[in-house]
Image (cartoon, rainbow, N blue to C red):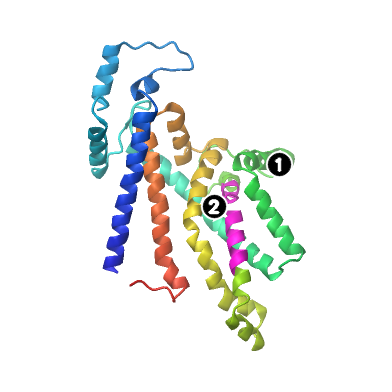
Amino acid sequence: MFTYLSTRALRWITGLLLVLFVSYAMMFYGTGDPIKRMFIDLREGSMTVDDAMLDKLRAKYGLDQPFPVQFANYVGKLMQGDLGYSIREKRAVLTMVQVRLPISMQLGLVATVLAALIGVPLGVAAALHHNRRLDSLIVGISVFLNAVPIFVTGPLLMVLLVLVLKIMDVPFGWKGIFHSQVILPVTVLAFSPLPTIVRQTRAAMLEVMGDDYIRTARAKGLPERIIVLRHMLRPVLIPVVTSLGLIMISLVNGAIFVELIFNIPGFGKLTLQGLQQVDYPIIMAVILIGTLIVMVSNLLVDIVYPFLDPRITRG
């Protein structure tokens, strides 16, 4: 176990440093002078800054140094828990992340649970009715949800439920995860991983149904419900769990649109804000945390996988 965790930790650190290095290099070499981009409003084109002031600002934020020095300083600050300072917002990025990230994590967690509670039964039902009407209906809905982006389904559901059916008020802002206004944002966000869960569950179910031990269980006269719950469900969950990393990526991407549509001050909206304002410290923090979320998701997969499939062991 110690060897396994050490190997994983080394891969984590190496992968994270590589992602940060490439991201930092792209911003350093590919976007021009960051000070000019962050301080000159291109939309109005009315702000003028003399060269002396630009040089002073570059020196203040350490942007007058060579790339290797800048990157080394950035990593050194990261090791001290310093994510940098937002030049546009005049605030520490860590403070902003501490406020915004928990909101998105709550939304993502509830959306994942909702998608799993809906997607797994739908995938099982589709497999049990393979090549019949119910299977075609479930597969068709999954394909439709996968094809229609969140920034389309969100406003459509808002119009339908708020204006047409009038069964809820306009969900706007953030009043806590237990407030009724969270229902629609969570539902829209759950649409992002739902097709993946349905597809993975259905495919795994069809594969398991042909195994010898399932035919043996049916030959013994066990009820279909018992066969599904006791003998089929656990191996069916394996591909769903292994796709957790992809699910988290889809949730992170979907959160940007959901939080924008419903004006939720979460991490997704902070991401969009950093990109729109070309706020480099925020962009780097978003890349760092997004990478960590995927890595932690993959670690959880490695931990849970042996419990779902006892045949998997770690040397």
Which structural element holds mark 2? helix
> Magenta stretch containing residue 196, yes or no?
yes
Q: Amino acid at mark 2?
A: Ala
What residue is shown with label 1? 160
Query: Which quarter of the picture shows residue 80?
Result: top left
Give yes or no for residue 309 being in the magenta stretch. Answer: no
The C terminus, quarter of image: bottom left
Q: Does the rendering let one see residue 177?
A: no
Residue 157, compared with residue 223, is above or below; it is: above
Q: Residue at x 53, y 55 (%)?
A: 112
Q: Which residue is mark 2?
A: 111
Work out which quarter of the rendered image holds the N terminus and state it.
Answer: bottom left
Q: Is there CB contact under 8 Å for labels 1 and 2?
A: no
Kindly identify the residue that appears in the image at 53 percent across and 62 percent down.
240
Residue 212 sits in which quadrant? bottom right
The picture places residue 307, in percent across and down from the top left corner, at 44, 72
Type of residue at label 1? Leu
Instruction: Give left or right: position of 9 versus 170.
Output: left
Q: What's the distance in space between the residues labelled 1 and 2, CA to CA?
A: 20 Å
SS of the residue under disc 1: helix
Range of the magenta residues? Answer: 186-204
Residue 65 at what x, y percent from top left? 23, 27
Q: Tell me which corner region of the image, top left, top right, bottom left or bottom right, holds residue 312.
A: bottom left
Residue 121 lies, in percent from the top left, at 63, 65
Secondary structure character of the magenta stretch overall: helix
**Which residue appears at 44% of the width and 36% of the height?**
270
